[in-house]
Amino acid sequence: MIPRIALIAHDKKKDDMVALAREYKDFLLGCKLCATGTTGGRLIDEVGLTVERKLSGPMGGDLQIGSLLVEGEIDAVIFLRDPMTPQPHEPDINALVRSCDVHNVACATNLSTAHLVLSQLQAGAAN
Ligand SMILES: O=C(CO)COP(=O)(O)O
């Protein structure tokens, strides 16, 4: 089955997300991807991935992805959060991460965990 992955990064983490996506590009090309608006734009323009773009996070993009997730449409979330910068849509962010916990969906909120999740999914896809 094709992994369905959501990719989200706060502004100061977007360079990390682009670098991560480049590293896993071959694998991600075979996945069904969605992303919040600005993150998705960068992944399309700078990495060459095909991504279903939702609204920007502060405009409800995290909630749109959360809605997909609770409907069983997402297998893993890579959410590079910025823990040092207050976000106007903090409740939306918490709702998405909570939904991952409620529905037992893998949620990587930092680069180290993102590598663990992506490498594991990649290994699974190869088998
Ligand atoms: O704010 C975000 C996640 O909470 C990310 O949104 P953008 O990808 O549109 O910047």
Image: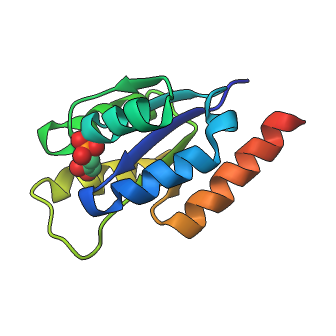
Q: Where is residue 52 in the image (x, y as percent from the top left)?
A: 40, 23
What scheme was used to colour the molecule?
rainbow
Residue 72 in view here: no
Residue 41 in view here: yes
Side (left or right) of 95 relative to 74: left
Residue at figure coordinates x 49%, y 36% from the top left? 47
Residue at figure coordinates x 51%, y 33% from the top left? 74
Looking at the image, is 83 positioned above or below residue 74? below
Q: Position of residue 108 (x, y in %)?
A: 51, 58
When asked about the image quadrant of residue 85, the answer is bottom left
Q: Where is residue 105 in the image (x, y as percent from the top left)?
A: 55, 47
Looking at the image, is 97 positioned above or below residue 61? below
Side (left or right) of 10 relative to 45: left
The residue closer to the viewer here, 4 or 97, is: 4
Residue at the farthest right position: 127
Looking at the image, is 73 positioned above or below residue 83? above
Side (left or right) of 12 relative to 79: left
Q: Quadrant of the C terminus?
A: top right
Residue at the farthest left position: 88
Residue at figure coordinates x 28%, y 31% from the top left? 64
Q: Quadrant of the N terminus?
A: top right
The residue closer to the viewer here, 109 or 101, is: 109
Residue at the farthest bottom position: 84
Q: Where is residue 67 in the image (x, y as percent from the top left)?
A: 34, 31
When asked about the image quadrant of residue 13, the answer is bottom left
The residue closer to the viewer here, 22 or 34, is: 22
What is the total number of numbered labels drawn onto the structure image?
0
